[in-house]
Image: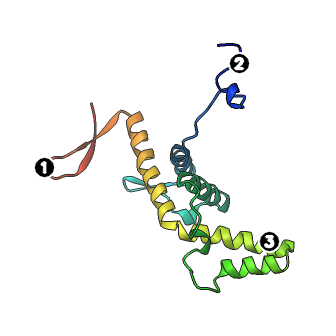
Amino acid sequence: MNSQSKYDKLGHSVKGLTYVNHKINLSNYAEELVAHYAKFEGDQYELFLSDLPESSQNELARLYLESTNREVNECVHGNDFAIDNDYTCALLAMLQDDSQENRERFAEVTRKNILTYYRESLQSVIDDACYVYYQNIMNEQGYYSHRDMEHGEYYWSKF
């Protein structure tokens, strides 16, 4: 084969080809949020989506959308599918008068609706991250979880 790589023949110049795994990016970000914002309550970490700064909520939602192959058909309506919902009204206002104010209103309504629509899913991602974060901390301290086969409960012990 000559000096051209097989990728160059496809019309691409490839340097350090990297594959992006959006689900891993999402879980890594959620764990970062847990590390910065979660509270240790009883024997677990706890963090609620509503306790996060707006910018963190936005990034979590963005990563979630990426992990679901950018599926946004219904989420822009939030949980309101009426013909005159906030999203449709903001969109129509912006199309009628493309002002900065109407663009900002449309963007804010869309952001709010996406967070409303995916609230349970995003909270589930955070809950999973709390669990993984706690396990990682315990493992770093030499503890490992075991399941009591008789009662089905988990407990921590050192080997």
Q: Residue furthest left?
A: 150
Q: Quadrant of the C terminus?
A: top left
Q: Amino acid at mark 3?
A: Arg
Residue beneath the point at 16% across and 53% down: 151
Residue beneath the point at 58% across and 36% down: 19
Residue beneath the point at 73% across and 69% down: 107
Q: 33 or 142: which is nearer to us?
A: 33
Looking at the image, residue 103 sits to the left or right of residue 79; the answer is right
Residue identifier under label 2:
4
Question: Callout 3 environment at 10 Å: few (<14), some (14 to 19), or many (20+)?
Answer: some
Question: Callout 1 environment at 10 Å: few (<14), some (14 to 19), or many (20+)?
Answer: few
Upstream in sequence: badge 2 or badge 1: 2
Position in image of residue 144 (x %, y %): 31, 37
Residue identifier under label 1:
150
Question: Callout 2 environment at 10 Å: few (<14), some (14 to 19), or many (20+)?
Answer: few
| Up-down relation of residue 50 to residue 19 (above or below) | below
Looking at the image, residue 52 sits to the left or right of residue 150; the answer is right
Separation of marks 1 and 3 at Cα, in angstroms: 60 Å
Q: Amino acid at mark 2?
A: Gln
Q: Nearer the viewer, mark 1 or mark 3?
A: 3
Identify the secondary structure beneath mark 1. Answer: loop
| Up-down relation of residue 112 to residue 151 (above or below) | below
Residue identifier under label 3:
103
Residue beneath the point at 56% across and 81% down: 81
Q: Quadrant of residue 93?
A: bottom right
Separation of marks 2 and 3 at Cα, in angstroms: 47 Å
